[in-house]
Image (cartoon, rainbow, N blue to C red):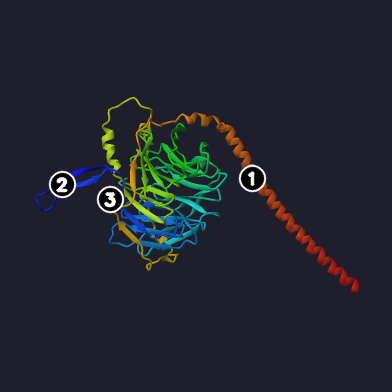
Amino acid sequence: MSATISLYWAKGTNMMTATQVPDDPCVEKLFKGHRGTITAVDFNPNMKQLASVSMDGCLMVWNIKPQIRAYRYVGHKSAVMDVCFSPAGHLVASASRDKTVRLWIPNLKGESTVFRAHTGTVRSVDFSGDGQSLLTASDDKTIKVWTVHRQKFLYSLTEHMNWVRCARFSPDSRLIVSGSDDKNVKIWDAASKTVIHTFHQHGGFVNHVEFHPSGTCIASAGTDSTVKVWDIRTNKLLQHYTAHSGPVNSLSFHPSGDYLITASDDSTLKVFDLLEGRPYYTLHGHQGPCTAVAFSRTGSFFASGGSDDQVFMWRTNFDEDMVIKERRSAVSEPPTIRDIPPRAKTPLMNEVDQANGMNGISPILDNAYQSDIEDVPVGKIGNATREPVKEQNQLPSNINSTKQKILPPELANTMQQIVGQLEILTQTVSILEQRLTMTENVLQDCVKNQRKIMGRTVSD
């Protein structure tokens, strides 16, 4: 691990002290308390709390200050698949395999309200930028939008042909991106509720999707072990990474938009430098697959979770390199993320987290449960390896050959519609068969009753 020496004046003395400040990411805290694979993590915007959810069916809210104990919320009846803090940090939403979504107040009481959101596992939950709307995605192949206050259903998006694993609002909440087991990534217009574009390039299930902080790009990760970054204005593939050797489960953009971090079944986290179009760091620490990762709102920290039931909070450190990169002389290079101007922003309303919307349903907090929070000395857990600098990989040569094997968008859309219609026909035939069976049973009962009546008439 490389390090620099920082000099500072010790308080109350005339002595200058030297301390080593690591340049590379390092684990700062280790959180132990879950009893199953971590499925998602998210920082409270106030940077005082970190939330994690797990296959154990619990939501843990870790208070980053060591003197405050963690909260363990129990309410879901099955595995919890996703978690998200509201923009103001007053609420935290959790999505579960029990087909419900819960909205919690992240304090000692842990009051929550619950609503049945889908007819299948709810795999994803996200707040709009103004905190007024909630976005959910499910195994029932639908994406739904709700009001946060009173959880009123607004509308549904239904063009995916398989489980929808992830859906996210754009920074201005005007667009929605979704990824599905149908191997497609879709961009939706939230106002017209229609698909703007579908990206077909993934060769496997799409596990995670995310908007770039500028709102002009998206990134996706899939079971094909790839990470892709698209410009959604031109619908062009900007960057394509094959650095992982296993399925990529989660990803998160640094708030600057210059870095992307990913978590994979190959037991590593990887940081990608989007300005140079290459892998920057490979991080080791989890024993087994890495299943969740997220940057804090400031980018100074990021959290990761894995199948080892543990949550790590890392200090980023490398984002300080951005100051150096800003001073680089201009050279002729391929276009990168930095070249894309941000979307025009719309005024956002302040979030209204209505207390009277919380109805206090839930067994909530298990105070008897003792969790562990460890301050980790630098280098004790986890290690960061800088990737060697190679030729920039903005668009690798194999992209063109891959594109040749992909059907034209018009034909692919037509085929997709045909498959959808066939699925509807299959369901219709199944329903008709059930009704025919019911009719046959009723007729048989009628015949039996008629024979009984005839037999009584003859005997009389």
Q: Earlier in the sequence, mark 2 or mark 1?
A: 2
Q: Is residue 97 left or right of residue 251?
A: right
Of 322 and 460, the residue lying toward us: 322
Residue 244, by quadrant, is top left
Real-space CA distance between mark 3 and mark 2, rounded to the nearest whole angstrom: 20 Å
Is 184 drawn above or below residue 74 in the view shown? above
Of 149 and 59, the residue lying toward us: 59
Real-space CA distance between mark 2 and mark 1, rounded to the nearest whole angstrom: 68 Å
Q: Is residue 231 left or right of residue 414?
A: left
Residue furthest to the bottom in view is 460
> Residue at position x 37%, y 67% from top?
367
Q: Amino acid at mark 3?
A: Val
Q: Earlier in the sequence, mark 1 or mark 3?
A: 3
Which residue position is annotated with label 3?
Answer: 378
Q: Secondary structure at mark 1?
A: helix
Q: Amino acid at mark 1?
A: Glu
Which residue position is annotated with label 2?
Answer: 8
Tell me the crowding category of disc 1: few under 14, some 14 to 19, or many 20 or more residues within 10 angstroms, Cα based: few
Residue furthest to the top in view is 332
Q: Nearer the viewer, mark 1 or mark 3?
A: 3
Is 107 drawn above or below residue 380 in the view shown? below
